Image (spheres, rainbow, N blue to C red):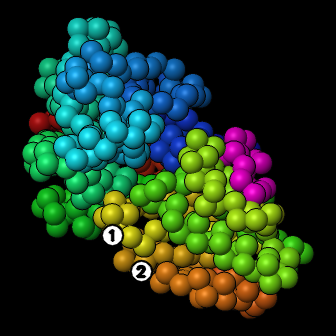
Amino acid sequence: MPDSAPFRGSFPRLLFITPAAFNRTSGGGITFSNLFRGWPKDRIATVHSDPTPVTTDICERYYRLGEAEIATWLLLRRLRGPAASSAAALGSGAANPRLRHRLKSIVFGDGLPERGHLSPRLRSWIAEYRPDLIYTILGGIGLMELIEAVRRDFALPLALHFMDDWQAAIHRGGFLSPLQRRQMQRLVARLVAAAEVRLGICEAMCEDYARRWGRSFTPFQNAVDVARWRAFAKRDLAVGTPIRLLYTGSVLGFAQAASLADCCAVVAALAGEGLAITLDIHSPLSQTAPLRHRLECGGAVRIHDTIAADEDYFRTLAAADILLLPVNFDAHSQRYIRLSMPTKVPAYLVSGTPVLAYGPPETAQIAYARAGGWAHVVDRRDPAALGAAIRRLASDMTLRRQLSAAQRSAAARHDAATIRPRFQATLAGARRQVSHA
């Protein structure tokens, strides 16, 4: 079945400056791919610092940022992980040797000083492309300084898209963190004030940010082709033997890793009590490898790589009996993801498979699940309550039918047939606003 109809207006030449580029692995990469599908390839160019390999089905023109554009002090370069410049949007990079890491934490906390430069090579690359508009999710201080420089030098309108409340969580824990935090806050404030288009990942974020900055924000998150993937949705809600639980998506320390580990421990305990039950986790192996000792609790829990093909992914969702949506309960995670909405949510809704949401009620995704009635919610960190919820979801057919029906209704809010052209028209409108000013 073909993709939904694209935006039919005039497409600007878009310059995407980002720590997370187009791919079919990360939440951001998947979201961008789904929202930009149908945008002419010759009108997208991406400047990025993403360590994940990029895909070319949406964009073919890439510029990989290096030390010439995002630089730290020479003596500190060995402390930077390979993904340090994307820490604000994606989390920390690879681990450093213990002593260096400890010194870094004491002095700089969770981030290192960095500067952004518009290098001659990048300036020439952008000039040759001739963009009409910058679209960005921002990132670390160096990336934001680079965005300011590109916007100023090329006199381009700016579209911002926030996907996590990283400003509330980063640059903490070190002697120099307050200095970097103030610098980060000034940069974000200037860019928000300068932007022609301001987007958030969900309604809760947009409402919060409108109060924070006194400017309007429009919600856009991942979208799925509902008509296409509903054909793969679950039809028989009866639970098989063993009970099959499934989690897909990122496993990050500041987002869901601790609560997913709780789910693993509870599944192992239920299996130890004689219940036939399994939990399959499909996530980037680079994320689960350091946590394998916490996640693989006995033979009932199995860890796999991400599912690359869309058809396989939606078939796997429908084949499960219960889908997990875990959210961490600790204060740092809540600061970071309180206003986030996971990429997986629209796919979960289309699948028709009952969802178990486990996380604090203050977070947007848990509140959305409860308000929409599309997940059975456990909103306190309580293994006994989590175990009881799993047992109930596996046995209460009335509840399973209610949840599945609510999912079908909620899925319409995430349909690419309407979301994608509206998103693309919103970006195209930024160029028109500037040209008519």
Mark in the foreground, 2 or 1:
1
Q: Secondary structure at mark 2?
A: loop
Looking at the rendering, in which quadrant would you find the C terminus?
Answer: top left
Q: Which residues are magenta?
A: 302-316
Query: Is residue 102 rendered magenta in the image?
Result: no
Which one is earlier in the sequence, the residue at label 2 or at label 1?
1
Q: Residue at x 70, y 65 (%)?
A: 297
Q: Amino acid at mark 2?
A: Pro
Vertical placement of residue 314 versus 262, above or below = above
The residue closer to the viewer here, 114 or 407, is 114
Vertical placement of residue 259 versus 227, above or below = below
Query: Is residue 314 rendered magenta in the image?
Result: yes
x, y (%) of residue 375?
59, 78
Q: Amino acid at mark 1?
A: Ala
Q: Residue at x 47, y 45 (%)?
A: 28
Q: Residue at x 42, y 80 (%)?
A: 361
Mark linked to residue 361: 2
Looking at the rendering, in which quadrant would you find the N terminus?
Answer: top right
* Snapshot quadrant of residue 301: bottom right
* Snapshot quadrant of residue 321: bottom right
The residue closer to the viewer here, 340 or 411, is 340
Note whether residue 259 is visible: yes
Residue sitting farthest toward the right: 241
Q: CA distance from mark 2 to mark 1?
A: 13 Å
Q: Residue at x 26, y 40 (%)?
A: 104
Residue at image mark 1: 331
